[in-house]
Image (cartoon, grey):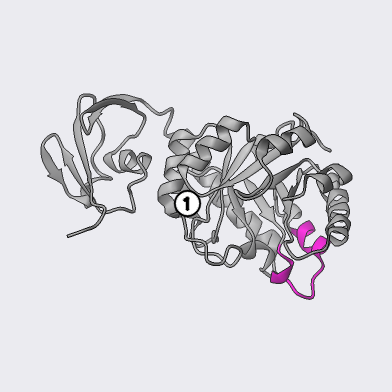
Amino acid sequence: MLGKKDWRSFRLYVITGENYHPGRSLTDVMEETLRGGADIVQLRDKNASKAGLLEKAKQLRELTARYGVPLIINDHPDIAIAVGADGVHLGQDDMPLAEARRLLGPERIIGISTHNIGQARLAQAEGADYIGVGPVFPTGTKPGRTPVTLSYVSEAAAEIRIPFVAIGGITPDNVDSVLEAGARRICAVSAIVGNADPAGVCRRLLERISRYEAARESSGPAKSCEVTVNGRSVLTDAGTVAELVAQYGLLDRKLVVEWNGAVLARHEWEKTPLENGAVIELVHFVGGG
């Protein structure tokens, strides 16, 4: 086990997906991702036998140790312990977090998949080290799973204090929208391991993340202001009406915004800065006649 030192600073999390690279070995492809800058690697294989999964875990433990990168095992704490992996990732229907912590101890990393803010709050309260937020977009890795959309990314960014990683259908072509929604960490599977140049895709994703980090730093620390939202006084660090709407997870919804008593057109949300004392009504239409 490499330990937990500095692991929270990760930016690019890569999950295995051997079905996306037939003819290329698991270790060859994953080494390419490490050369490209992957900060964390997860072994995920729902079809392998226990013995087969253990052998793959041993190979990846040796590989990731050479690069000083944490290895996470999906679903199987016993295999994580057996190979000295750095932690496990659990789904909503897997082993309870408390039981995994009992088996793994306080030093190993435990990540939890979440699909809504309620699950995120619970994972954080129960002691998860990080959460996955997704799937953001439709993805073959989770067939049939309804995307959580960018609204949940914004909700997690506004509220969750442990590290979260956005996952699901993310590619170099759409990653900007995920970063704009508030993500700081990105996870990808097919877009990376299914590409002929995994290292190149990793570098492109990291470049986009770095650009957004630089833009945030240059804009300086966020300033809070006190506004009234639907009759309640709230303190927010949102800079514009659009950012406030995102914090409430309503960007993708049918919504009317009243700003100091007047309806504010959607195209004006990004242009309207929040100011102390503003009175805002968010009227969310949920369907019906």
Residue 224: in magenta span: no
Identity of the residue drawn at 77% across and 58% down:
30
Residue 156 location (% of width, % of height): 47, 40
Determine if residue 215 is in view: no
In this view, 126 is above or below 22: above
Image side of residue 248 versus residue 87, left or right: left
Residue tagged by mark 1? 178
Identity of the residue drawn at 68% across and 54% down:
14
Residue 125 location (% of width, % of height): 56, 30
Nearer-the-camera pick, 116 or 207: 116
The chief SS type of the magenta part is helix
Residue furthest to the bottom in view is 23
> Picture quarter containing residue 232?
top left
In this view, 203 is above or below 197: above
Determine if residue 225 is in view: yes
Image quadrant where one finds the C terminus: bottom left
* Residue range corresponding to the magenta coloring: 17-32
The amino acid beneath tag 1 is Val
> Picture quarter containing residue 108?
top right
As helix, strand or loop, the secondary structure at mark 1 comes to helix
Nearer-the-camera pick, 95 or 107: 95
Identity of the residue drawn at 79% across and 64% down:
48
